[in-house]
Structure formats: C-alpha cells, structure tokens
C-alpha cells in the first residue's frame, strides 16, 4: 500500500537487533569452540566425568551428550534470534502491517507478511515478547521486544474508537 493511503505511522516494533545478533554470535562461537574442545579431548572428559561422578557409564554418557548439547544450543540460539528479528508490526491510521514471528511448531505459518485494514481488527493481546492481533479470519502473532507497549496501546485505541 502507498504511504498516503495508510495514514500516519502511529507505532512500530521494528528494531535494529544488531547488538543482540552480535552477542548471540559471540556466545554461539564460544559454545562451538567449547564443544569441539570437549570432543577433541575425549580422554580428559572421560577422566573428569569419572572422577566427578564416580561412574564410568555416566562419564561416557556425559562425554557424548555435553558436546552435542552445546552444538544444538548454539544452533538453536542463532536460528531463533535471526528469525525473530524479522518479525514486526507497523500500526498506521488506516492499516496494520507486519510480518508474523517464526514458529518452530508451525513453520508454514511463520514469517508471513500481512496487511489488514483497521476495521478488520477484532482484538489484541500482549505477551512477554509478542503481540497477537485478532481478526475475524486470522490471528497474527508478532515478535515485539521494542515498542511493544506503544504498539498495543495504538491497537487498543483503534478498537476503542471503532477503528
């Protein structure tokens, strides 16, 4: 939609998440390094686990699962932060636009662009780091860490004023 037909921008949850992305990448790199270090020093892990836990079976189990856990956790952190950063909502006078958040359980409905007229809005709810926008035909869940309260307030004002 053209900017003039949307009206004035009332609120936006778009944010520059560069700082968060850099910190997650640094943490992920440390976890990857630690994971590879543990895998490369198999004997050290075995002896440490045996001495600490006093059980050879638990030592072998720990030797395998700890590096795998670090690898999976690093990958998960990077994926979630980068995909959640693409989600936003822009509240204009006449239109609500945005991109839904990434959902690991339902990837087909994730990161979908939407544009709804203000009169289609039926309800709005707020969670810790997200906003749910309800219409008669769909629910849009948007990740919103920045300006969440401002966006929810603008959406609720639209509901109270009859759009």
Image (cartoon, rainbow, N blue to C red):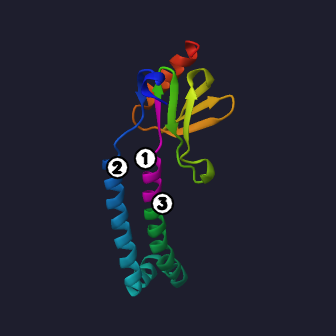
The residue wearing badge 1 is 85
Q: Secondary structure at mark 1?
A: loop
**CB-based contact (under 8 Å), mark 2 and mark 1:** yes
- Residue most toward the right? 137
Q: Which residues are magenta?
A: 76-90
How many residues crowd around disc 2 within 10 Å: few (fewer than 14), some, or many (20 or more)? few
Determine the CA span between mark 1 and mark 3. 14 Å
**Comes first in the chain, label 2 or label 3:** 2
Rendered location of residue 156, percent (x, y):
53, 20
Q: Which quadrant would the C terminus be assigned to in this image?
A: top right
For residue 120, side relative to residue 90 (left or right): right
Q: Is residue 51 shown above or below 83? A: below
Rendered location of residue 153, percent (x, y):
47, 22
Determine the CA span between mark 2 and mark 1. 9 Å
Residue 106 visible to an observer of this rendering: no
**Comes first in the chain, label 2 or label 1:** 2
- Of residue 123 and residue 63, the one placed in the foreground of this image is 123
Q: Secondary structure at mark 2?
A: helix
Determine the CA span between mark 2 and mark 3. 14 Å
**CB-based contact (under 8 Å), mark 2 and mark 3:** no
The residue wearing badge 2 is 20
**Comes first in the chain, label 1 or label 3:** 3
- Residue in view at x 55 percent, y 37 percent: 114
- Residue in view at x 41 percent, y 81 percent: 39
- Residue most toward the bottom? 43
Rendered location of residue 17, percent (x, y):
35, 46
């Amino acid at each position: 939609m053209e900017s003039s037909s949307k009206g004035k921008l009332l609120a936006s949850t778009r944010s520059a998440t560069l700082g968060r992305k850099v910190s997650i990448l640094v943490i992920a790199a440390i976890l990857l390094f630690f994971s590879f270090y543990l895998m490369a020093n198999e004997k050290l892990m075995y002896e440490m686990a045996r001495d600490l836990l006093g059980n050879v079976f638990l030592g072998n189990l720990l030797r395998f699962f700890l590096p795998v856990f670090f690898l999976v956790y690093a990958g998960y952190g990077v994926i979630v932060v980068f995909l959640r950063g693409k989600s936003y909502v822009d509240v204009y006078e006449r239109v609500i636009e945005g991109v839904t958040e990434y959902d690991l359980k339902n990837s087909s409905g994730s990161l979908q662009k939407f544009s709804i007229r203000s009169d289609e809005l039926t309800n709005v709810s707020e969670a810790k780091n997200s906003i749910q926008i309800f219409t008669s035909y769909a629910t849009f869940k948007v990740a919103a860490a920045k300006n969440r309260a401002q966006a929810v307030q603008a959406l609720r004002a639209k509901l109270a004023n009859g759009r």
